[in-house]
Amino acid sequence: MSTRLPEPAGRLIDRTRTVAFTFDGRSYEGFEGDTIASALYANGVRVLSRSFKYHRPRGVFTMAGRDANTLVQVGPEPSVLADRRPITSGLAVTAQNVFGRAERDFGAALDKLGRFMPAGFYYKAFFKPKGSWAYWERVLRRMAGLGTVDVHTPHGPFDKQYLFADVAVIGAGPAGIAAAVAAAKAGAEVLLIDENPYLGGALAWGREDPDGSRLRALEASVAAYPTLSVMTDTVCNGWFEDNWLALIRENRLSKLRARAVVMAAGCDGQPAVFRNNDLPGVMLGSAAQRLIRLYGVKPGSRAVIVTSGAEGYEVALDLRDAGVEIACLADLRQDPPAAPGDTHFPVIAGAAVRAAVPGRGGAGVGGAEVARLSADGRLGTSIDRFACDLIVTTVGHHPAAQLLCQTGARLRYDDDAQMFRVAGLPETVFAAGSVDGIFGLESTIADGTRAGSAAAAAIGLDAKSSERPQSAPAGEGAPWPIFPHAEGKDFIDFDEDLQVKDILSSYAEGYDGIELVKRFSTVGMGPSQGRHSALTAARILSRAAGTTVDGAGVTTVRPPVGPEKIGHLAGRAFQPVRLTAMHHRHVALAARMMPAGAWMRPAYYGTPGDRDAAIHAEVMAVRENVGLIDVSTLGGIDIRGPEAAEFMNRFYTFAYLKQPVGRARYVLATDIGGVIIDDGVACRFGDEHFYVTTTTSTSDSVYRQMLWYNAQWRLKVDIANVTAAYAAVNIAGPKSRDVLAAIAADVDLSADACPYMGVREGLVAGLPARLLRVGFVGELGYEIHVPASCGEALWDALMEAGAAHGIRPFGVEAQRLLRLEKGHIIIGQDTDGLTFPDEAGMGWAVSVKKPYFVGARSVAIQRARPPQRLLVGFEMAKDDPLPEECHLVVRDDTITGRVTSVALSPVLGKIVGLAYVAPDQAEEGTAISIKLTDGRLVTARVVKPPFYDPEGDRQAL
Amino acid sequence: MPLALLKRALLGSRVKDRQFIWPGDLKKSYDVVIIGGGGHGLAAAYYLAKNHGITDVAVLERGYVGGGNTARNTAIIRSNYLTPEGVRFYDESVRLFQDLSFELDINLMYSQRGHCTLAHTDAAIRTMRWRAEVNKHLGVNSELVLRDDLAKQVPLLDMSEDVRLPILGALFHPPGSIARHDAVAWGYGGLASHRGVEIHQRTEVTGIEVEDGKVTAVQTNRGRVACGRVLQAVAGNSSEVARMAGIRLPITSIPLQACVSQPLKPFLDPIIVSGSLHVYVSQTPRGELVMGGSTDPYPLYQTRSTLEFKEELMMHLLELFPFLSEVKLLRQWAGTADMTPDFSPVMGETPIRNYYIDAGWGTWGFKATPVSGKRMAETVATGKVPDLIEGFRLSRFTEFDLVGEKGAASVGH
Ligand SMILES: Cc1cc2nc3c(=O)[nH]c(=O)nc-3n(C[C@H](O)[C@H](O)[C@H](O)COP(=O)(O)OP(=O)(O)OC[C@H]3O[C@@H](n4cnc5c(N)ncnc54)[C@H](O)[C@@H]3O)c2cc1C
């Protein structure tokens, strides 16, 4: 590890602890605190990745996790930022998108073909002659893509957290710290967030704080306020409406609601554009400084620096202090002010790097060509060549304003600062520091204090406002640090391997604005989302189109700011399941459970192998003796109040004003379009009290609709969704009364006292119960609703009392068959998203006498015209091929309908079903053709349901 | 190395290769004004010029060409709809798409992947069978595939039974495809501009003049333009623009979001959709996973992104592909879907004479770009509505003659 510098360089590493890891199969050692990139750099490894299109070698560029050059694969995780991810013992790192290794990639031959692959080349080729795209697509798909997905990756332990703060401060550099302290001082609860493992931002690695005293003072000011909390190593990845912030730290997504936000996320150094400006060894000044101060790594042995302001001189001094020889500093300015202090290195004013010369076998910098600039900023022809292994650039900045832009703020180009600035922030969002173009330590701190106080004032705290400070000149950017080269490889977007000519050719082909240029050339669409290309692209386009940089503009910024894992967003995948009070009884009885809306219900009791036999036995039990089914999942809604009956009358299609107390009545609901949306029964337990059931999957939506309508009607009713408060069963079969009577002694169950469609309240097995004598399955039967806490007790009591009568629990499958025999429809199965009551044969449940119900107008219009289809019953012989639900009814070659329900009825000994048919096929006795999956046509005969007990004697017993 | 690239490299590009020819100032009047320079408006312009020789046409686009929903959609193309009207209509579009790269001389990267709509409940199985049967009856390739076969066909799917909603089967539709959405707009717009159609970007229609029940002119931020006929094709802004002409539409505008992962080496071929889990995903030729779900819970004229959308979507995505948790999201965005009550589009005539409408494209209109462009051009040119789109007329809503596609369009766009 020869390139490590002595302390105090390397503030993040612990030199007493070495960590071994591998890269592309070779072993390396670093120190605890190193990132993958810093450890590799210290080991002399410069090539971390290969570029997307040309497979050019790429290495450290920002050293801040802000570029795509350092994306590597770590085990099953693709696209890991090597300059952010710490090394851990045994970490296995590999290069992405290489044919071989990062150092030796056979894909590099593509670099030579660059001229055949201009922007958008794939739109122009690969599709002629016909059929050829299928071949080329396979080739290109294999070339594309960065990391690989390991299909055995386990779902990691991700989780989520909710946080609240008065003021959230994003970015803990001097501006952010000052803002946080100012807000805390004003009495706010503050959360200060930074993506780095340390506080101080640029102060931690820049030259402004030689003895560290300023940083220590800032750290102390943070510690002084108990109401100021700090989250480091945390990326704020998105701003959403109402200051809802997504924070990611390790495997946790924290969702922070803040009353006000200060964004102090700093800025991104911008690349200079020249030939081979992407070679490993060409990096931002800040990257070199980070290597030195944070990781104690010497960035090179001989450097050329290109700068547009004072910043480059500071970097040069840092490099020199670290023992790097300065070959030359090229200052883009023709008349730079006197260099600060004792430089002692050659400065060429009015000059730029025009090309990096490859060294290290093509995989790094070997030298730099420096050329003079003419007064109008063009490169001259006389060239100075310098041998070097490092080229450092500081030519301007772009605000790290992604979060600010997500709030709706716009970026406007500031011609004085040669940088985009933020405009148009919402009332509770503030920007501070270099993200808003304020540079220099004192100015930044003052700006942070201003923003923090303003944030506190915005939420009603008492805080003094102050003026925005002047920026120090440190941030000076060049207006045009772009030096196209006749032979190209002058990259403006590293992620996408785009060169100057790609923007120009896109424009020339008619892509006349930044949005179209972006979409056509893909500039800014790679993983670094335009951080280092947006400004350059805007500049080049502005010249091509003859507009200002502001006129060319930048494209819309979208979340997330940085990469976020799918696992972060998914969290623990919490998926609530509703279980009925009797669930464990079903499980104990070996029920096969199935999802039903939010619930689980028994499909049948038995193993899949005995499915048919089990259903058959359940059906026969109900028809011959007695069966018990858990119907707790049906929705239950209590409607109480003086206008309860009027409410019912408006919400449902039938008539309810005169429904007697103690009786149940069928309910059918339509939407405003007259389409059936639900059914159930309404029980009137008192003048002012209805208890209505809904189907299993509609309880929430029907309840919501009820509230929605009554918000307009303002009827005096109280609507309560009591679905979860009740457990319910249906006990059905000729012997059901006997079973129930044995445990409901105080309720008179005789046919006179409790007739079909009668309802009662009383004690069943000592439990307070609502008794509904209804008959979905077509036998004598009772629904019994008890408080949910009594569900199991009810179930047990009925099973015990029924044992002597051969009681059997039955599931959804048997119930479906039983109700089909009886000709009852299931909403959602025998109806669809367009079914009107008359079409489904439910016209009888629509009251024509009342003035209004939801959907009345549509139903009336519908009734006034001939129907288009009708739901009918049909039957077929027992041995006919059994159609399946949704097989089509066809006539000649036209589809006239479909089967909605069908089954072989064990009781009737034939196939029975329901189907939509054309109205002229609805006549009893009509033969209809049903088309099976294999295309065969089978004939069925239209009959009038019910198929079983048409007179309804059995349920009226 | 394909010849086309060699030629370009050696000869450089020429005017003929220019994708767009941009017009100068707006003229005072045009025979046809098309409002909206999305895929639909541009396709209609192209077919007006090519099939009907009508080139005195201005496309007025308030932003940039193809920058609306055309730029934001997830580019799924299929014809496995539910109603005969829907299946026939989208089937014609799929057929047009298959040769469209040649017709438009731009590689649309039309990629036939197979479209697989999962069923997790027996109700969903019934709907899938219904679609399969209608599709097959009309000559469209679709099949209901049950659990075991599906596991062989898409081995990456998590077929566990001990999850909340186990996969029971799927509707498999081999013609299902994806394409490069931008290129569709550029192809149509570019060729239309070469044939003399004027495409005016940054030109917003702000008013519509109607005299004696007939449209006569549109007002724009760049002045008034007289016109013989108007075609409105503004997708998410349909109700607002129709209102300018005094027409009320039964349309609700709801944000629809989508997102994309970082590029990955190819591992997923088919397009996978789950209605019950509200998620769909495909992998583009670039290697990105493109993912979306259902519309936002409430209507809004704003294209902001939400965190909740991603959280839900990713949770459900991992139920299908649990191994994706380490993959990273790159970008999310939103568009505006103009939803109709029956989940079918609105095409054809309006109560205003010479004012034609192409709207109600909700979450499903990208795939219809070629067919709607072609058929709307025919409507505008001949004044007669072709049979293929008759069923989608605006008046169907007052006549209760809906084309119910909810079962085929609510999540799988
Ligand atoms: C996230 C998302 C995913 C989708 N996925 C799919 C999919 O997978 N498959 C599919 O088939 N469909 C999908 N869609 C739907 C599809 O994108 C749209 O239906 C389709 O793009 C509509 O095309 P268009 O040309 O009509 O509309 P647009 O492309 O929106 O074009 C309309 C244009 O009109 C312009 N405009 C509006 N008002 C005015 C005015 N007053 N003056 C001038 N110009 C105006 C707009 O700027 C816009 O450019 C999706 C949509 C979204 C949002």
Image (spheres, rainbow, N blue to C red):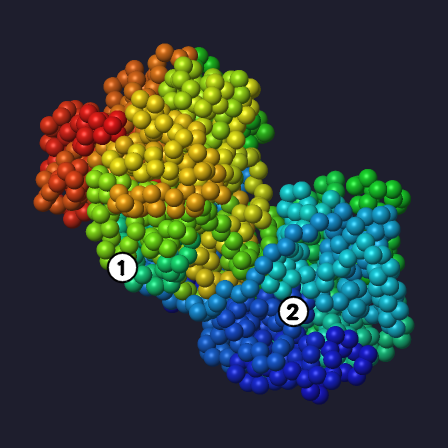
Instruction: Name the amino acid, label 2.
Output: Arg
The chain letter for the residue carrying disc 2 is A
Residue B225 in percent (x, y) is at 51, 25
From this viewpoint, is residue B119 visible? yes
What is the spatial separation of the Cα atoms under label 2 and label 1, in whole angstroms?
Answer: 44 Å
In the picture, the quarter occupied by the C terminus of chain B is top left
Label at residue A84: 2
User: Does dot 2 land on a helix, a strand or a loop?
Assistant: loop
Q: Residue at x 84, y 61 (%)?
A: A223
Label at residue A933: none
Above/below status of B22 relative to B391: below
Residue A744 in percent (x, y) is at 38, 34
Residue A732 appears left or right of A636: left
Label 2 and label 1 in one chain: no
Front-most of residues A152 and A200: A152
Q: Residue at x 60, y 68 (%)?
A: A81
Label at residue B149: 1
Q: Residues within 10 Å of mark 2 (few under 14, many from 20)?
A: many
